[in-house]
Amino acid sequence: MTELGPVLVVTNLDDPTADLVIDELHDRGVPVVRFDSGDFPATLSFAARITPHGIQGSLTTPTRTADLTQIRSMYYRRPSGFAFPHLDEQTARFAITQARYGLGGVIASLPNCLYVNHPHRIGDAEFKPSGLAAAVQSGFHVPATVITSDPIEARRFTSHYQSVIYKPLATPLYRLDGVSSTVEVRTVTTDEIDDSVSGTAHLFQHCIDKTADVRVTVMGDRIFAVRIDSDLLDWRTDYDKLTYSVVELPPGTEESIRAYLSHFGLVFGAFDFAIDKLGQWWFLECNPSGQWAWMEPDTGLPMVSAMADLLERKRT
């Protein structure tokens, strides 16, 4: 391996989790180059050559220049995406495509780089049907689920399981009266299912009668499990109502977690589980770019340090 150089942090400007990790790396004397894909091409440029030794070249921000052969790791968080607002629609569409496959292809092909996570692997793991299928194969308990555009099938499912929730399959930007909103997880009954279901794909899932939730965050070899207590169906709708406690994994859960991450080629994952009244853990999802830093102050878990260790490529 060549001499270890900077950590690349790829995310948008408003990312407090990335800020904490970058501060920790700076305190350790580890160089960091941060950029957002939305910076290209205004304040971000690159030049890459394809050689017998792999991709070589450099990436330049207003304050840093990084040798592509010496990137030690990449923390691929939440970039805003490419945008060319000064171009007409057709030309902008062409430019975005070239940027995605050009710059995007270069940063996905760096030699000697540890990806946390690789952007292509993130893309694979973000498909909920793939994640649920992999969870079953990995040995997790997974609630009964149907993904359909057929109203008859949806009614059949809700009628059979009685207690059913609807989940969006992805969470793109959604605006109500100009205000950014999210489509919430919510319960749904058979009489609410109408023919509008045929308009797109929907995910319906048996609702676990839960006593608590658990967020399990995996950073390389480190695993942090936090129980989340609330009276909410979806705890992410009101963080002020949550209380946290550190918990141990049930037998066999770590093996299933490792199998799941290996399936998608991930080194980081934020797993969500529901605990039922018998103490059984039910897999809900794994976010390959999930949030985690907000839990550290209440639990005392050294999560920022663990992520910095991983990106520094420090052996623990």
Image (cartoon, rainbow, N blue to C red):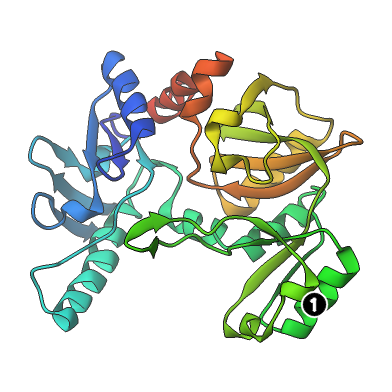
Q: Secondary structure at mark 1?
A: helix
Q: Quadrant of residue 247?
A: top right
Provide residue 124's location: percent of width, then percent of height.
Answer: 53, 61
Q: Is residue 11 left or right of residue 203?
A: left
Residue 192, visible in the rendered structure: yes
Type of amino acid at the residue the image marks with label 1: Arg
Q: Nearer the viewer, residue 195 or 171?
A: 195
Q: Which residue is mark 1?
A: 155
Provide residue 250's location: percent of width, then percent of height.
Answer: 82, 30
Residue 301, visible in the rendered structure: no
Q: Nearer the viewer, residue 43 or 243?
A: 243
Q: Quadrant of residue 108?
A: bottom left
Q: Nearer the viewer, residue 174 or 89?
A: 174
Q: Nearer the viewer, residue 272 or 41?
A: 272
Count of numbered badges drawn on the protein: 1
Tell me if mark 1 has few (under 14), some (14-19) or many (20+) residues whose alpha carbon lies within 10 angstroms of its own.
some
Q: Is residue 84 left or right of residue 120?
A: left
* Residue at the spot 44% in from the left edge and 22% down from the top edge: 304
* Residue at the spot 24% in from the left edge and 61% down from the top edge: 82
Q: Quadrant of residue 188?
A: bottom right
The answer to whether residue 280 is above or below residue 262 is: above
Q: Is residue 208 left or right of residue 147?
A: right
Query: In which quadrant will I find the N terminus?
Result: top left
The answer to whether residue 86 is above or below residue 224 is: below
* Residue at the spot 52% in from the left edge and 62% down from the top edge: 170
Provide residue 66's location: percent of width, then percent of height.
Answer: 18, 39
